[in-house]
Amino acid sequence: EVQLLESGGGLVQPGGSLRLSCEASGFSFRLQAMGWVRQAPGKRLEWVSTINSGGTTTFYEDFAKGRFTISRDDAKNMLYLQLSSLKTEDTAIYYCTLSDQIPRGQGTQVTVSS
């Protein structure tokens, strides 16, 4: 059974940073492309970023380019998302996903507010 456990969210001021983590189990993590999606209050789920298996190629939605960095540690079955220069509009629940972009965990709440 695929299990994805997100952590690392919190309350941060505009301009601040957070590092989100996702612990994966129940599948061959190193063989899977992985990604992050988010859902802001009252809005639809939106794609944030994807990293290929092996971690050699990354993709970002326009709002994430230059501010967010996706990475993975296949030895630990961990996926990460470094968030920097955060804006109030980044407030959302962030979920890690397989390449299907379907949330399976509880997500981690990121709140950007002064």
Image (cartoon, helix red, strand yellow):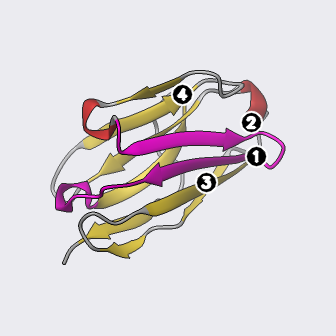
Is residue 106 visible to us here? no
Check disc 3 and report the residue beneath it: 22
Q: CA distance from mark 1 to mark 4?
A: 15 Å
Q: Say the numbered circle drawn on residue 29.
A: 2
Among the two numbered marks 3 and 2 on one chain, the one whose residue lies closer to the N terminus: 3
- Residue 89 pos. (x, y %): 18, 56
Given contact means CB atoms under 8 Å apart, are the residues at marks 2 and 4 in contact?
A: no
Please state if 74 lies on the left or on the right of 52 as rendered. right
Q: Give the structural element (helix, strand or loop) at label 4.
A: loop
Among the two numbered marks 3 and 4 on one chain, the one whose residue lies closer to the N terminus: 3
Amino acid type at image mark 2: Phe
Among the two numbered marks 1 and 3 on one chain, the one whose residue lies closer to the N terminus: 3
Q: Nearer the viewer, mark 3 or mark 4?
A: 3
Range of residues picked out in magenta: 66-91
Q: CA distance from mark 2 to mark 4?
A: 11 Å
Whether 67 is among the magenta residues is: yes
Q: Give the structural element (helix, strand or loop) at label 3.
A: strand
Q: CA distance from mark 1 to mark 3?
A: 8 Å
